[in-house]
């Protein structure tokens, strides 16, 4: 029944969308390098990865166009799409991603788990996604990864890279040196070659304020976690994997672990003010992330923003959605297109925040405020600074293949990868 509902939803999406967006494909101006690193793709809020059954029926990366990971592999690209909590906090997702990459037990941190009243340890991954990651090869070159995140996945890979580089002082202070996860000790900036964010709320999204004004956030949280509790304790657990065993809300797929009573687990998780996705997607949560992490001199940073709005021909002030905008995003897009003031926001919200992709403001996706940035120059791509790509025409879903033809999507990602692949390697 559940799979049938997914199939119906996919059919509806395809029926309503037949738009080929104006993807901006990077111009390759560099020569090939002698070292190639695997590409790790990380999904956004409500997304999924290759470990989940739903991905076989409807791939997150590729969506209605193709199975993007398979197509990239057919073109010689080493890539994997990770699976992390679809509505977990950014911190928890980064910890889960690290465990998958290294083939270890998920460690959410001694200090973090006590602060937020959940288990320190999650599931164990017996095989690493990337073998010999962080080790040197026979040519004395470091084995690195390229991280690519869509939407909230961009925030997750930014935090992962920041923790690898600088560690976390609270975890270091709270944990025995023999018991601390390598994720929290720092000194691993050279484990990552590049960080690429696509439609990422690097500075949050004004949609969070709109949802809060409509009293939708608390209702939405309750609905999502109830949904997870029911499905995550059913035979369908694993078709969609919620990664919420640290709260005792769901089983680890394939295991019959002890979980909390539903009410107790829900009470615990709904008490989280800061260890949740709603906070992390807000401008306040984004600022907290931006203040926590910094750029590293030996890492390439790229950001891609999409825009699905234009100036209203009637008022000239509001932003209205293009006719091609995915139907489920149009209302969000137009509400964001008139939102231009919030005195309580940590960033000045003004007219520049109106253009959006249906979920994320263009200005929020381009680069984290306070970070060094420059407009993309194919002749001068630098490390340690955000290379801000030209804005593409399209919506939040187009970026991962919803309503896009296979050729356009593959050209977009192959161009992105060629640009990354052809930059000089760093120490």
Image (cartoon, helix red, strand yellow):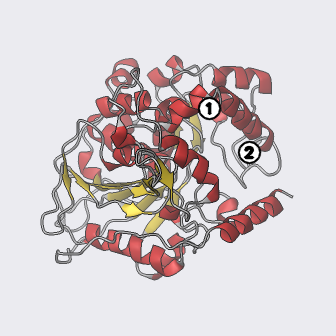
- Which of pointers 1 and 2 indicates the residue nearer the eye? 1
Does 195 appear above or below 292?
below
Q: Residue sitting at 75 percent across and 49 percent down?
A: 237
Question: Residue 393 placed where, x, y %?
Answer: 42, 64
Instruction: Using residue 58 as the reference point, say whether residue 146 is left or right of it.
Output: left
Q: Quadrant of residue 183?
A: top left
Which quarter of the rendering shows the C terminus? bottom left
Q: Residue sitting at 76 percent across and 39 percent down?
A: 227
N-term mark: 1 or 2 = 1
Q: Residue sitting at 78 percent across and 44 percent down?
A: 231
Q: Is residue 100 visible?
A: yes
Outermost residue, left side: 380
Instruction: Using residue 108 as the reference point, say whether residue 380 is left or right of it.
Output: left
Q: How busy is the neighbourhood of tag 1: few (under 14 within 10 Å), some, or many (20 plus)? A: many
Outermost residue, right side: 1
Tally of numbered tags: 2
Q: Residue sitting at 51 percent across and 70 percent down?
A: 69
Does 339 appear above or below 8?
above
Instruction: Using residue 390 as the reference point, say whether residue 102 is left or right of it.
Output: right
Q: How busy is the neighbourhood of tag 2: few (under 14 within 10 Å), some, or many (20 plus)? A: few
Return the residue at label 1. Answer: 246
Q: Please tell me which residue lies in front, 371 or 114.
A: 371
Does 123 appear above or below 382?
above
Q: Quadrant of residue 61?
A: bottom right
Q: Please tell me which residue lies in front, 10 or 86.
A: 10
Which quarter of the rendering shows the N terminus? bottom right
Instruction: Using residue 208 as the reference point, say whether residue 290 is left or right of it.
Output: left
Return the residue at label 2. Answer: 255
Q: Quadrant of residue 300?
A: bottom left
């Amino acid at each position: 029944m559940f799979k049938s509902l997914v199939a119906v939803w996919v059919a509806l999406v395809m029926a309503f969308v037949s738009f080929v967006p104006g993807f901006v494909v990077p111009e390759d101006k560099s020569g090939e390098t002698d070292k190639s690193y695997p590409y790790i793709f990380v999904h956004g809020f409500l997304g999924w990865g290759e470990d989940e059954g739903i991905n076989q029926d409807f791939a997150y990366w590729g969506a209605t166009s193709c199975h993007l990971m398979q197509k990239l592999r057919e073109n010689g690209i080493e890539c994997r799409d990770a699976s992390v909590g679809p509505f977990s906090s950014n911190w928890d997702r980064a910890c889960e991603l690290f465990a998958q990459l290294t083939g270890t037990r998920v460690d959410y941190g001694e200090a973090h788990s006590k602060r937020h009243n959940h288990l320190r340890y999650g599931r164990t991954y017996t095989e690493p996604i990337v073998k010999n990651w962080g080790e040197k090869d026979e040519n004395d070159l470091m084995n690195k990864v390229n991280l690519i995140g869509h939407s909230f996945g961009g925030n997750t890979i930014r935090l992962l890279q920041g923790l690898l580089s600088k560690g976390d002082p609270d975890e270091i202070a709270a944990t025995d040196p023999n018991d601390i996860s390598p994720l929290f000790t720092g000194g691993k900036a050279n484990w990552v070659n590049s960080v690429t964010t696509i439609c990422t709320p690097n500075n949050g999204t004004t949609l969070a304020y709109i949802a809060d004004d409509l009293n939708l956030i608390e209702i939405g949280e309750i609905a999502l976690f109830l949904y997870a509790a029911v499905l995550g304790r059913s035979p369908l657990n694993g078709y969609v994997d919620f990664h919420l065993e640290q709260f005792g809300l769901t089983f680890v797929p394939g295991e019959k672990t002890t979980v909390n009573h539903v009410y107790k687990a829900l009470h615990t998780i709904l008490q989280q003010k800061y260890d949740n996705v709603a906070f992390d997607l807000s401008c306040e949560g984004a600022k907290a992330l931006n203040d926590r992490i910094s750029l590293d001199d030996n890492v390439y940073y790229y950001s891609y923003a999409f825009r699905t709005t234009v100036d209203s021909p009637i008022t000239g002030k509001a932003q209205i959605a293009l006719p091609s905008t995915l139907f489920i995003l149009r209302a969000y897009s137009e509400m964001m297109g008139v939102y231009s003031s919030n005195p309580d926001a940590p960033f000045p919200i003004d007219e520049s925040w109106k253009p959006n992709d249906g979920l994320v403001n263009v200005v929020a996706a381009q680069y984290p405020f306070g970070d060094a940035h420059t407009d993309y120059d194919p002749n001068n791509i630098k490390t340690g600074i955000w290379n801000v790509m030209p804005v593409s025409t399209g919506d939040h879903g187009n970026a991962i293949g919803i309503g896009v033809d296979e050729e356009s999507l593959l050209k977009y990602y192959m161009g992105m990868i060629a640009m990354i692949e052809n930059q000089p390697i760093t120490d």
